[in-house]
Image: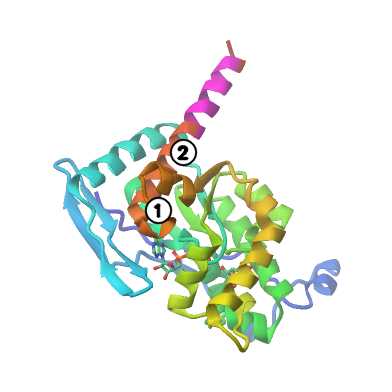
Amino acid sequence: MEVSAALSLQCSSWIGPDKVARRSTGLARPPRERMPPLVRVGYPRRDETSIRTGRAELKIYCCYKKPSGWENFHNSFDEALILQSKSEKVLLHLSGRCIYLVGMMGSGKTTVGKILSEVLQYAFFDSDKLVEQAVGVSSVAQIFKDYSEDFFRDNESQVLKDLSSMHRLVVATGGGAVIRPINWKHMRKGITIWLDVPLDALARRIIAVGTASRPLLHQEPGDPYTNVFMKLTDLSEKRGKAYANADVRVSLEHIAAKKGHQDASALTPTDIALEALMKMEDYVTEKAAALSRRFV
Ligand SMILES: Nc1ncnc2c1ncn2[C@@H]1O[C@H](COP(=O)(O)OP(=O)(O)OP(=O)(O)O)[C@@H](O)[C@H]1O
Ligand SMILES: O=C(O)C1=C[C@@H](O)[C@@H](O)[C@H](O)C1
């Protein structure tokens, strides 16, 4: 069954750079030209393949970017069935709760999130994109430049708050969303999944696509890999504990070891999505069991 609905999200309040003064007077209005547009998010339909499962049409995003460029990755029929069966088990206990993917830049939140949204028949949102649309600026890097990181973070919190009142969404959050406790309050309404990716794999992925869209990794003279690796190391040291707040941890190192791979770079997005579903299943069934014990 194909999910075709496009959702619309009206960001309930736009946060301007002078928000503190405006808020305290109760006059939090952005300048007219900066009024938030109605954010409409549909489904990307590129780069997908469909597999007939006999019962329903399961569509799975099948391209992902490897350091060498775009490569097709076709899920086998078996993988599609396993994804489907796992997602059905997870859905039994999800009750429409949203899924929030957290993790460092480049950890695959968007790539894996799209697979999860397809198999769970949830809508997919990328919170960075929603912030861009709410602010009316076409890239996060530009928002950092024109305003500030704090301004971006305020809008990110607002977007997460708005999303938290919705159901059946998979949300790829910004890499730094975990640093504000208020964001956890919003994300706790759903289930949070941390994609824990070794820094070396992250650095290689990011170098392959460039750092232009990632303001916290802006390039300095020297070896690009070393620069990115050092910055990621610094961020991950500062954020490690915050990511670990997630309900579910999906460690690419663990999956690679389980599958007998030397390192995480051999893993496909489907491998990771499957592990995420398995971990989610453990989490939701355990929570449901704990809840029923309380009522016995
Ligand atoms: N399992 C994988 N193997 C190889 N490359 C991958 C894998 N998953 C994602 N990628 C690639 O890594 C890059 C980052 O992936 P993606 O955009 O999904 O991450 P993200 O966590 O959403 O990043 P950000 O937070 O910076 O937006 C993309 O170029 C993507 O194609
Ligand atoms: O890790 C981070 O702090 C960020 C990650 C990106 O997703 C964007 O949200 C922004 O570039 C900041």
Q: Which residue is mark 2?
A: 279
Q: Residue furthest top?
A: 296
Is residue 79 magenta-colored? no
Query: What residue do we see at 61% from left, 89% from top?
Result: 221
Residue 250: x and y in percent read: 49, 46
Q: Is residue 82 found left or right of 224 in the rendered image?
A: left
Q: Amino acid at mark 1?
A: Gln
Q: Which residues are magenta?
A: 283-293
Q: Looking at the image, how many numbered discs can be counted on the residues?
A: 2
Residue 221, numbered label = none
- Residues 69 and 182: in front is 69
Q: According to the image, label 1 marks what residue?
A: 262
The residue type indicated by label 2 comes to Lys
Image quarter of residue 134 = bottom right
x 39%, y 49%: residue: 273
- What's the residue at 48%, 63% (across, down)? 201
Q: Secondary structure at mark 2?
A: helix
Residue 61: image x %, image y %? 30, 60
Left or right placement of residue 199 versus residue 27 in this view = left
For mark 1, give the secondary structure.
loop
C-alpha separation, residue under disc 2 versus residue under disc 1: 22 Å
Q: Position of residue 19 (x, y in %)?
A: 78, 73
Is 288 above or below relative to 281? above
Residue 284 located within the stretch drawn in magenta:
yes
Establish if 50 lies above or below 295.
below
